[in-house]
Amino acid sequence: MRKEIEKIKETESPPKIIKNLYSAEEIKEFLKLYNDLPTTVHNKKQNVIKKRWLEGYNKKLEKLFCDRLKKEIGDFKMDNLLDESGKDCFGLIQESYAPIGLHVDGGFELKNQIYKQSLIPLTPIGSTIIFKNRFYEGSTNFTKDPEELKKKDLKYGQNKRSSQHLDMYGDKPFDKEIHEKYLKHENIDNLKGLEVELIYEWEIGSMLIFDRTHLHCSSSVIEGKKIGIATFTKK
Ligand SMILES: [Fe+2]
């Protein structure tokens, strides 16, 4: 359990969408950066390619990104996965062909005072669902699937699996219409007790910022593939 929960709660605020933050030219540069970076994970089962945004590939973008994020959320420290030499990076760029399930990105160090996370879409079609419900432990995938729940042998950077969310937020069935429209990849029973805070419709040039304690997932709306940059911060 975390010690910093009260401090984390003090910095919480509603999710925020900033429109027209990045120009078409800058988005092109992000996509070039994505192409230039080495692949960290290619999970063929989940059909996802993950690349860490390592320092040194595009100094201009690094500065632009940090300056603009700081303008929105004030002082922060990065809290992304470390590279091989133990250095922090700017985030994770993810190319996915299938929707990501319900989870929280609470991080891998419970001593950290987690803060905000951001998402920049690099492709136009997609959406991200943020739930009102919050969770104060580390990075966790929430599932009822017994096969998933068996997975205990996790590598650095892998979320633990848990069904404890089913005992935390009550028994109210999840909204059928929202499930049908956005969350077909999730078993509706796995969403009981959850309420939607915000549905972020991806739009090129915009950025989503939200507290790292929010449960969230991607929507089932994907046309081919989608690419996005996720960055995690702490205080
Ligand atoms: Fe996430």
Image (spheres, rainbow, N blue to C red):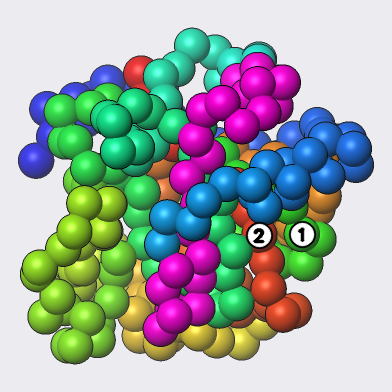
Q: Which mark is residue 123?
A: 1
Coordinates of residue 221 in the picture (x, y in percent): 68, 77
- Crowding around mark 2 (Cα neighbors within 10 Å: few <14, some 14 to 19, many 20+) is many
Q: Are marks 1 and 2 in contact (CB under 8 Å)?
A: yes
Q: Is residue 168 above or below residue 187?
A: above
Question: Quick one: label 1 or label 2, which is nearer the N terminus?
Answer: 1
Q: For marks 1 and 2, give the CA distance.
A: 6 Å
Segment colored magenta: 42-66
Residue 135 in view here: no
Q: Is residue 201 above or below residue 36?
A: below
In-image side of 165 versus 190 (left or right): left
Of residues 135 and 50, the one drawn nearer to the viewer in this rendering:
50
Residue positioned 77% across, 59% down in the render = 123
In-image side of 27 versus 157 (left or right): right
Residue positioned 59% across, 64% down in the render = 95
Q: Amino acid at mark 1?
A: Thr
Give the residue at the far right of this rendering. 24
Residue 59 lies in the magenta stretch: yes
Coordinates of residue 202 in the picture (x, y in percent): 74, 57
Residue positioned 82% across, 50% down in the render = 204
Among the 4 quarters of the image, the one containing residue 101: bottom left
Of residues 211 and 13, the one drawn nearer to the viewer in this rendering:
211
- Crowding around mark 1 (Cα neighbors within 10 Å: few <14, some 14 to 19, many 20+) is some
Residue 105 in view here: yes
Q: Quadrant of the N terminus?
A: top left
Q: Is residue 36 above or below residue 72?
A: below
Residue positioned 79% across, 39% down in the render = 29
Coordinates of residue 210 in the picture (x, y in percent): 52, 39
Element type at mark 1? loop
Name the residue carrying label 2.
Answer: 227
Of residues 129 and 62, the one drawn nearer to the viewer in this rendering:
62
